[in-house]
Amino acid sequence: MNRTQLKRSKILRMALDGEDSMDGKTDSFLVRAVKIAFVVALYWFVSITMVFLNNALLGSRELDAPLFVTFFQCLVTVALCWLMNLLGRLCPGSVDFPSVKFDPKVSREVLPLSIVFIGMITFNNLCLKNLGVAFYTVGRSLSTVFNVLMSYVILKQTTSLYALLCCGVIIGGFWLGVDQEGAEGSLSWSGIVYGVLASMCVSLNAIYTKKVLPVVDSSVWKLSYYNNINACLLFIPLILVFGEVNKLYNFSRLDDWHYWGMMMLGGIFGFGIGYVTGLQIQFTSPLTHNVSGTAKACAQTVLAVVHSASVKSVLWWTSNGMVLGGSFAYTWVKGLEMKKSQEEPQVKSRAGV
């Protein structure tokens, strides 16, 4: 086992067992609870802030260039990877970041995933731009359904009846939400289409990520580095084809440092969400992370409605409840199934089978 593996295993053991990093003593329940609460709160803050910030950038009436905004955020992520790589070399004991060096061969092997990645972040931003933050959760709610569908089509993995019932609740909530948005006169069909495409790309991204990770030594940060480099290169012709260069040329705030500061901040939060997501999983569990994400989506919806000072119908809120409840139930069911599958070999071995 090399030094990096030892370091990671030590961090993981500390997170799970609550050991103090300095003297190896076990933290009290209160200290562990405070640490977990801080990490969860940090994840909520970064994630919700990023969504509202992207909504403000994409909703600008002065510059309708969603591809350029997404391209710039990818560029910032690449720059931050280089910065973290440099800090890791200068301060090896303080900054733990894998060495990133561009390899054209690796870039080509990651390219299929990068194409899906571009679709995911582009359709995600277009969905947010057209639907707004309040309906964003429902508009992007079919990711779980596509996970089940794509797992069967591509990986030939079947899904239990209980998990399928949860997906049924999510689909019901999605269509009820679409109906209620239409009744209020605020429905954007283009936003719905973008949301469905984003959900499909999220599912494909998860599947192809598992296939591509071994190419980058199973390093999520290296994968993010190559994904964003490829995305930057692929976005350039897309920006030209969709005429966003002319929009940028005529943009009146090209010399406005406040605007570029907001763009930089959006890129930093986009980079940061990867870190805080890993941190939350490390200090809790994948199941708890998914539950936290569902609760965060609920809080995000409430904040968006309060911020816009809009009044929503009972059925509109019911649709959100169905989507969030179905997502939570699906996560819980899959967690129980995973636990059962892990316990079965142990039971068989004890029985001498």
Image: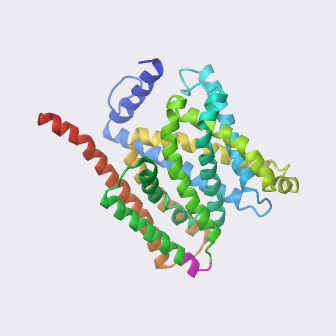
State which quadrant residue 91 falls in.
top right
Identify the residue shown where x is 44% and y is 57%. 149
Q: How is the image coloured?
A: rainbow
Left/right placement of residue 83 relative to residue 161 reads right
- 137 inside magenta stretch: no
81 and 230: which is toward the camera = 230
Residue 259, visible in the rendered structure = no
Left/right placement of residue 350 relative to residue 199 reads left
State which quadrant residue 56 falls in.
bottom right
Identify the residue shown where x is 75% and y is 50%. 238
Q: Position of residue 38 (x, y in %)?
A: 46, 44
Left/right placement of residue 267 relative to residue 136 reads right
For the stretch drawn in magenta, the main secondary structure is helix
Q: Quadrant of the C terminus?
A: top left
310 and 32: which is toward the camera = 310
Q: Quadrant of the N terminus?
A: top left
- Which residues are the magenta region? 180-185
